[in-house]
Amino acid sequence: MNMALDSVMWEMAKKTPEIAVLRFYTWKPSGVSLGANQKPEALVNIEFCRKNNIPIVARVTGGSAIFHDREITYSFSSVNDEEIFVGPLTSYEKICGALSQGLKKLGIDAQWRGQSKGKEPSLTDRDCFSLSSRHDLVIDGRKIIGSAQRKDRISFLQHGSLLVDIKKELWEKIFLQKPDFTKIVSLSELLQEPIDLRHIVSVLVRGFEDFFQTEFEMFEFSAKDIETAIKMERNFLLI
C-alpha cells in the first residue's frame, strides 16, 4: 500500500503545482522494496520472504533493494520548479540537505556523498545500503539514508530510507549477497538510546521547514485517495 500511496501523493503534487508534499511512514508488516527495473530472484531470498510474511514490492523509482523494518521511509513530491530545483541533481541535493538539517537537531552530522562508486544501484545484485551512490547521506562514509527518484516532464517523486536499527541476521537471510555492514550505520548505533519514532519524524519535518524556509501543514489522505491506492496496490506487489 505504501508504494501506491506514494503514487497518489505524486499525482496530488502534479495537480497542485503550488505545493510540495512530504510524507514519513513505516511498514507493517516489514517488507522489501526493489528499484523499478530489478528482479526479486536476483537480490532476495524469495522462499524465506514467503515463509516469513515479508512482502516484496516494486518502487516507481530506481535504486536497489531495501528491507523496510526498523527504519523510517520518507517521500517528497513537487513540480520541477526552476527557481528551487535548478538542474537534474538539485532536487536530490536540496532534499538531502533538508534531511541533514533535521539530523543535526539530533546531534548527527550527516553529509551528502556527492559521488558514486561502482555500477548504478539498479544494475547490481547488492542491497541499497551496501552500495555507494552520490545521493546518499553518510556519516564518516557510512550510509544512514539511501534515496531514489523518478522524474517526468513536470514533476518528480523522491523517497528514501533512514535506518533506525539493523537486524543483521535477518538482513543476511533476506538478501542473497551478504550486506556489507561496514558501510552502514543506524540511528540506534549513533544515539545509543531508545528511539522514539514520532520524535524523529517531528525533528525531520522541522529540518525541512528550516531548510526550505516554509511551514508544512498536516494533511490526511481522503477516502477517495485510499480507494485509488487500494486499486493500484497489486501493481506494485511482486511476491
Image (cartoon, helix red, strand yellow):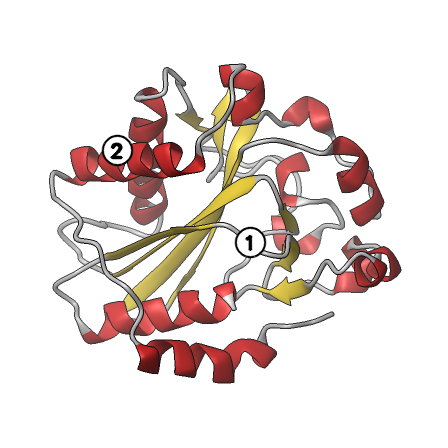
For residue 176, the mark is: none
Tell me if mark 2 has few (under 14), some (14-19) or many (20+) residues whose alpha carbon lies within 10 angstroms of its own.
Answer: many
Q: Tell me which amino acid carries mark 2.
A: Gly
Q: How many labels does the image show?
A: 2
Question: Viewer-proximal residue, 234 or 113?
Answer: 234
Q: Can residue 175 be seen in this view?
A: no
Question: Viewer-proximal residue, 197 or 176?
Answer: 197
- Left-right relation of 130 to 201: right
**Residue 214 image position (x, y, % from top left):** 11, 43
Tell me if mark 1 has few (under 14), some (14-19) or many (20+) residues whose alpha carbon lies within 10 angstroms of its own.
Answer: some
Instruction: Name the residue carrying label 1.
Output: 27
Q: Give the spatial CA distance, label 2 vs label 1.
A: 23 Å
**Residue 133 image position (x, y, % from top left):** 55, 39
Q: Which residue is drawn at 38% across and 33% down?
A: 200
Q: In which quarter of the image is the C terminus?
A: bottom right
Residue 116 vertical position relative to residue 31 in the rendered view, above or below: above
- Answer yes or no: do the residues labelled 2 and 1 have beta carbons within 8 Å? no
Give the structural element (helix, strand or loop) at label 2.
helix
**Residue 28 image position (x, y, % from top left):** 58, 56
Q: Which residue is drawn at 60% across and 80% down?
A: 234
Residue 126 vertical position relative to residue 33 in the rendered view, above or below: above
- Left-right relation of 108 to 131: left
Q: Which residue is drawn at 23% across and 50% down?
A: 85
Quarter of the image where one finds residue 114: top left
Q: Is residue 34 visible?
A: yes
**Residue 231 image position (x, y, % from top left):** 49, 85
Q: Which of marks 2 and 1 is nearer the N terminus?
A: 1
Instruction: Name the residue carrying label 2.
Output: 207
